[in-house]
Image (cartoon, grey):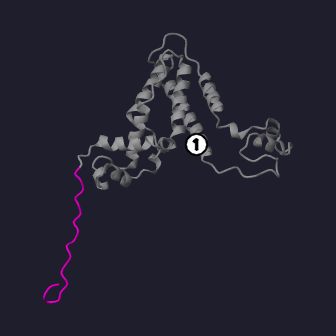
């Protein structure tokens, strides 16, 4: 103890400085992709990502503006890993497989579906895939306007079916409705049974056809709707190649 009775000051612990890391954009994207592969992208925050890379959160913003931009990078990575359908396929089969590829990826990774639904996707791999689809349609003989119409309709149907399927996967557990039809809602056969109980005078079509709403978002129904959509378009006879509506 000091002679004047004052308590000596204890030395303050020194914090070890953060390790200096040479951070590049590719490092950030790679960490996000790794999180995506582990199924953790949906819960990933910029702070947690910074901790993974052993840097301060502010260090990330020198390379990535926000999580949305990061999701675009992950989406680009995923789309770049999908091989386009074989050019040996007929145009209808090529487009059907093209839609099925997107449907499978977005069903498996709902966080990427959310990004697709928020705004048009313009990452380079998506643009490359769109260009390939338009080329297949153009070579089949469709004019430019028809190519855009077919492509747009196909993507809209794909995203709609995917959103419905994904939302139902995460829906609430079936609630009992046995007092109505003897079958729990959400179980196979509920909707046809329910519609059969409706008064036919008021709901003649529903009481007669008894649609199964549970199948509206099924894989088989998706494939059938895509096939019907493509079958409604008939490529002009003759050689394919770039055409515009004004030239036809």
Picture quadrant of residue 203: top right
Q: Is residue 114 magenta?
A: no
Range of residues picked out in magenta: 1-20
Q: Which residue is mark 1?
A: 166
Q: Nearer the viewer, residue 120 or 178?
A: 178
Q: How many numbered marks does the figure carry?
A: 1
Residue 245 seen in the current view: no
By secondary structure, the bulk of the magenta-drawn segment is best described as: loop
Q: Secondary structure at mark 1?
A: helix
Residue 104 seen in the current view: yes
**Where's residue 78, x and y in %?**
43, 35
Which residue appears at 54% of the width and 16% of the height?
Answer: 90
**Where's residue 60, x and y in %?**
30, 50
Residue at far left of view: 3
Question: For this view, does 200 lie left or right of residue 33?
Answer: right
Which residue appears at 74% of the width and 38% of the height?
Answer: 212
Dot 1: within a 10 Å radius of its alpha carbon, few (fewer than 14), some, or many (20 or more) residues?
some
Q: Nearer the viewer, residue 81 or 143?
A: 81
**Where's residue 4, x and y in %?**
14, 89
**Where's residue 41, x and y in %?**
44, 46
Which residue appears at 53% of the width and 19% of the height?
Answer: 91
Q: Is residue 16 magenta?
A: yes
Which residue appears at 44% of the width and 24% of the height?
Answer: 132
Q: Please determine whether, in this image, residue 1 is positioned above or below residue 244.
A: below
């Amino acid at each position: 103890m000091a002679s004047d009775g004052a308590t000596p000051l204890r030395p303050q612990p020194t914090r070890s400085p953060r390790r200096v890391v040479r951070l590049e954009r590719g490092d950030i994207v790679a960490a996000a992709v790794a999180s995506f592969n582990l199924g953790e992208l949906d819960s990933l925050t910029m702070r947690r990502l910074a901790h993974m890379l052993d840097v301060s959160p502010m260090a990330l913003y020198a390379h990535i503006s926000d999580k949305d931009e990061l999701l675009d990078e992950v989406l680009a990575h995923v789309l770049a890993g999908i091989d386009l359908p074989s050019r040996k396929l007929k145009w209808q089969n090529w487009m059907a497989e093209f839609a099925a590829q997107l449907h499978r990826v977005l069903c498996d990774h709902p966080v990427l579906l959310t990004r697709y639904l928020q705004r048009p996707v313009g990452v380079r791999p998506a643009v490359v895939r769109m260009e390939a689809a338009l080329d297949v349609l153009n070579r089949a003989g469709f004019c430019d306007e028809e190519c855009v119409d077919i492509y747009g309709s196909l993507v809209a149907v794909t995203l709609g079916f995917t959103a419905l399927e994904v939302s139902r996967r995460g829906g609430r557990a079936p609630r009992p409705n046995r007092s109505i039809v003897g079958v729990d809602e959400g179980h196979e056969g509920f909707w046809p049974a329910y519609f059969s109980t409706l008064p036919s005078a008021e709901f003649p079509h529903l009481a007669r056809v008894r649609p199964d709403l549970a199948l509206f978002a099924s894989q088989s129904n998706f494939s059938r709707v895509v096939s019907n959509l493509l079958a409604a378009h008939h490529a002009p006879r003759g050689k394919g190649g770039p055409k515009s509506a004004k030239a036809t």
